[in-house]
Image (cartoon, coloured by chain):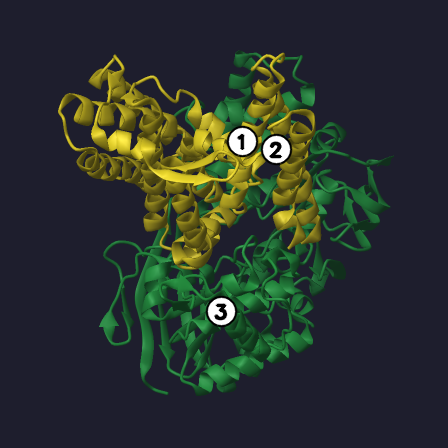
Chain colours: A green, B yellow
């Protein structure tokens, strides 16, 4: 029990503009379940990727000691061979291969140099029995539900006979019985001496199964605790941070929390197929409404519905007393909605284009392609926002891909501000950007409210929501579960509303 | 299960239909001889297309195969025809060289994360240019070994002949099926085409697999180039221009997804046969322009691409 199988010390990982990990440590002992906890963006996934070879830690920092030897894995296959097996948060299997092939890819049973399909299928069936799965192992993986795929991914991790098994949010898509089955398997592995890293947002499950807890916050190591000796409030405090208390006092929205401000945007019992259900959200004029919830709780889905990406199946939306029924983002933009998406890299920036071109894009789309914005006008627009938002760049012609995350985000904001929207939807505007830019973006949100714009902002950083929002809507399982304002709007209360299961 | 094999069945059914149509209309169409000629006439294309199948299932493309066929032919001509090497010695040099050529393209694709399209396009120009530089003229090959190769084979009923190129093709086909379905390398090929990132995270040795895939394709193209010299008894730098596109067409008609991850080597053989049957039909008819072959192949390609799209859409909704 005391023998450490894997010890990570003083690990740092820097991305352009962000320190994802700073001097983090993690010690795993044989036969324990070790929970790795922290808010979104705390650095859990990065740490997992570093320890499983999917990412390299910063040159010259820290050390990783596995099985008594210093190691630095350069690829996932190297880590797997050494005995570290990982089940990632999103199912990372191959949709086109059969269940059995997915379970044994790279480890297929062979005879005379040929893969023995019948034996492989037999072994697959036996393995899945542990997980109470009785399915056709020759069928391609994409025929099965996400929950089943998740269990198959875990079974693959187990089949590797690893010394360390990393489970990143394994229970997110599982129902109660499936979670119990998984815990049974975990107990079994534990008794065989496997060290398991368990990452989960579900604190009940953490207390149920884990022996120890390591908490990360903002890329830093906060502490290692024995689960049985750590009361839940202490854990939440460790996750959210002591500064929280200090931040709490600083509820300073850009506009007063007046109850009777006229509504600018209304979402009434909105349902989207395979997505949000009966969603009611009200954004008063000149106020900022925060939206909190875990990954997959429906935050992003709400944004997509407002912006016309997903079509609304039933229910109504209203913007400034007119019905809002966008069939496409172009229509939403015309109606006066703007959305800064969550994934800046894939949905937001156009890397090789200059700052000027990136800013002019949405306004040009709104004007239609026949009314071309002259280069001089684009230039003036870009210069105006570079100054207003303090975008750090020598000039407007620099390709946006070369800016830091915070500055990229400001350019995207500028793009949408240029369209002068009535409703600005920001999906995780502060994710992955450094502290300085962080504060500037929060200030900007306040200023926009002050100037009369209405905002709907999602964020995983609760203290941040509390600081600028007039009201926070909490989502869970694609429904609204709570609405907090005034005195009740504290990170602890939000956390509670998120965590109640 | 059914959607995986469906394109294969469709190709098979269309092929039988067309062949049946020819057999009813023309005397001698539905004979063993015609069938075996389809194989021997198209053996070099089938061998090339088998390599292309691997590449496309892995999610890539190889545009260099036509040029590699030509380069391999020219080298045969030079080494055997001009310098008097024994053909086997020449093959023993050409095949490893071609494999190395493919391996280098695979390495570029993997290490520099380049588009296979552009890397193999570069390979295409390079190999064609090199072949032309080595000899602008066609070089005749006159060697007893070649006569022996031409004479070797088995006589089958119906005045049919099972020759060296067909036998070689069948050998390649058997090995390819074994590799694709009974080896780890084959599983990796499908894995890469299914989802490159997942495959990497699951521990697939992506570098080795990518290099191996393009090396195999070039090896098979060079082998096809050698087979081509069996037909022509010569090596010429301008042979097989556009063969890469014929190979890609055969792969797609054979039911392999252009986006990768799904397909069968046997389907590709059916694809080439389909193209061959159309050609044979037009020859038997005698009144049709041979360009009808291209038109029909064009229509078939459209049909199969749409079919794949529809099947894929059904699959996405399923998930």
Residue found 60% across the figure and 53% down from its top: A459
Q: Does residue A412 sit above or below A291 in this rendering?
A: above
Crowding at dot 1, Cα within 10 Å, few <14 / some 14-19 / many 20+, comes out as some
Task: Out of B115 and A11, give the one closest to the viewer.
Answer: B115
Q: Residue at x 50, y 49 (%)?
A: B195
From the viewer's side, name the closer residue of B92 and B120. Answer: B92
The residue pinned by badge 3 equals A120
Would you name the residue on which mark 2 appears?
B30
Query: For the residues marked 2 and 3, what is the alpha-carbon distance in whole angstroms?
Result: 43 Å
Secondary element at image label 3: helix
Residue holding disc 1: B34
x, y percentage for residue A259? 80, 51
Quarter occupied by the N terminus of chain A: bottom left
Answer whether labels 1 and 2 touch (C-beta < 8 Å).
yes
Q: Quadrant of residue A496?
A: bottom right
* Circles 1 and 2 on the same chain: yes
**SS at mark 1?**
helix
Q: Chain of mark 1?
A: B
For residue A298, which quarter of the picture? bottom right
Task: Report the chain holding disc 3.
Answer: A
Depth check, front residue: A163 or A306? A163
Quarter of the image where the C terminus of chain A is located: bottom right
Q: Nearer the viewer, residue A30 or A318?
A: A30
Tell me how far mark 1 sits from mark 2, CA to CA: 7 Å
Q: Measuring from the top left, give residue B196's x and y in whole percent.
A: 46, 48
Which of discs 1 and 3 lies nearer the camera? The answer is 1
Q: Is residue A291 visible?
A: yes
């Amino acid at each position: 029990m005391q023998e450490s199988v894997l010890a990570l010390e003083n690990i740092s990982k820097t991305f352009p503009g962000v320190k994802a990990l700073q001097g983090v440590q993690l010690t795993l002992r044989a036969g324990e379940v070790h929970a790795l906890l922290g808010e979104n963006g705390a650095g859990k996934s990065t740490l997992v990727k570093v320890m499983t070879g999917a990412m390299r830690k910063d040159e010259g920092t820290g050390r990783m000691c596995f099985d008594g030897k210093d190691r630095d894995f350069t690829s996932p296959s190297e880590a797997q061979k050494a005995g570290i097996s990982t089940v990632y948060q999103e199912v990372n299997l191959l949709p086109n291969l059969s269940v059995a092939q997915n379970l044994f890819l790279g480890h297929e049973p062979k005879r005379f140099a040929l893969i023995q399909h019948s034996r492989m299928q037999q072994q697959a069936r036996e393995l899945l029995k542990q997980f109470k799965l009785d399915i056709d192992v020759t069928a391609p993986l994409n025929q099965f539900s996400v929950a089943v795929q998740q269990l198959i991914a875990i079974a693959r991790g187990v089949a590797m006979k690893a010394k360390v098994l990393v489970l990143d949010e394994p229970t997110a898509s599982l129902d109660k019985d499936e979670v119990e089955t998984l815990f049974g398997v975990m107990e079994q592995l534990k008794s065989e001496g496997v060290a398991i890293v368990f990452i989960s947002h579900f604190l009940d499950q953490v207390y149920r199964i884990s022996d120890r807890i390591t908490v990360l916050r903002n890329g830093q190591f906060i502490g290692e605790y024995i689960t049985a000796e750590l009361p839940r409030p202490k854990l939440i405090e460790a996750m959210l941070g002591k500064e929280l208390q200090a931040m709490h006092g600083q509820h300073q929205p850009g506009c007063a929390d007046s109850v009777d401000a006229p509504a600018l945007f209304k979402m009434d019992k909105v349902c989207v197929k395979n997505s949000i259900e009966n969603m009611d959200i009200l954004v008063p004029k000149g106020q900022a409404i925060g939206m909190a919830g875990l990954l997959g709780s429906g935050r992003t889905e709400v944004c997509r519905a407002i912006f016309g990406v997903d079509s609304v199946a039933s229910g109504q939306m209203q913007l400034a007393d007119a019905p809002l029924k966008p069939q496409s983002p172009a229509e939403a933009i015309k109606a006066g909605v703007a959305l800064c998406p969550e994934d800046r890299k894939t949905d937001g920036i156009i890397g090789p284009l200059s700052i000027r071109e990136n800013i002019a894009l949405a306004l040009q789309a709104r004007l239609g392609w026949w009314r071309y914005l002259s280069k001089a006008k684009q230039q003036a627009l870009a210069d105006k926002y570079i100054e207003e938002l303090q975008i750090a760049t020598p000039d407007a012609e620099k390709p946006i891909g070369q800016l830091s995350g915070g500055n990229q985000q400001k350019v995207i904001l500028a793009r949408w501000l240029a369209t002068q929207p009535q409703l600005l939807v920001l999906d995780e505007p502060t994710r992955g950007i450094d502290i300085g830019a962080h504060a500037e973006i929060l200030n900007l949100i306040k200023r926009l409210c002050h100037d009369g714009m209405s905002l709907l902002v999602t964020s995983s950083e609760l203290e941040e929501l509390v600081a600028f929002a007039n009201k926070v809507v909490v989502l869970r399982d694609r429904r609204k579960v709570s609405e907090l304002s005034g005195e009740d709007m504290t990170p602890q209360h939000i956390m509670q509303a998120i965590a109640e299961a | 299960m059914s959607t995986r094999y469906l394109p294969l069945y469709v190709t098979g059914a269309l092929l039988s239909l067309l062949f049946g149509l020819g057999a009813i209309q023309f005397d001698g169409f539905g004979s063993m001889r015609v069938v075996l000629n389809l194989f021997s006439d198209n053996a070099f294309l089938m061998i090339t297309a088998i390599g292309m199948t691997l590449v496309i299932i892995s999610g890539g493309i190889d545009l260099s195969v036509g040029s590699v066929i030509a380069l391999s032919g020219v080298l045969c001509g030079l080494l055997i025809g001009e310098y008097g090497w024994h053909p086997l010695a020449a093959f023993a040099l050409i095949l490893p060289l071609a494999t190395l050529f493919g391996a280098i393209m695979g390495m570029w694709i993997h290490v520099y994360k380049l588009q296979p399209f552009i890397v193999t396009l570069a390979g295409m120009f390079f190999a064609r240019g090199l072949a032309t530089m080595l000899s602008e003229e066609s070089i005749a090959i006159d060697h007893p070994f070649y006569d022996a190769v031409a004479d070797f084979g088995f006589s089958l009923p119906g005045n049919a002949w099972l020759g060296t190129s067909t036998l070689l093709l069948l050998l390649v086909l058997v090995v390819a099926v074994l590799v694709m379905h009974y080896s780890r390398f084959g599983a990796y090929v499908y894995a890469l085409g299914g989802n490159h990132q997942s495959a990497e995270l699951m521990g697939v040795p992506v570098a080795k697999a990518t290099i191996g895939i393009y090396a195999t394709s070039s090896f098979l193209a060079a082998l096809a180039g050698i087979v081509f010299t069996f037909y022509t008894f010569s090596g010429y730098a301008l042979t097989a221009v556009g063969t890469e596109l014929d190979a890609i067409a055969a792969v797609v008609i054979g039911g392999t997804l252009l986006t990768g991850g799904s397909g069968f080597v046997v389907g590709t053989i059916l694809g080439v046969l389909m193209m061959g049957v159309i050609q044979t039909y037009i020859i038997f008819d005698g009144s049709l322009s041979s360009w009808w072959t291209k038109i029909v192949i064009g229509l078939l390609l459209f049909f199969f691409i749409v079919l794949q799209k529809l099947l894929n859409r059904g699959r996405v909704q399923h998930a």
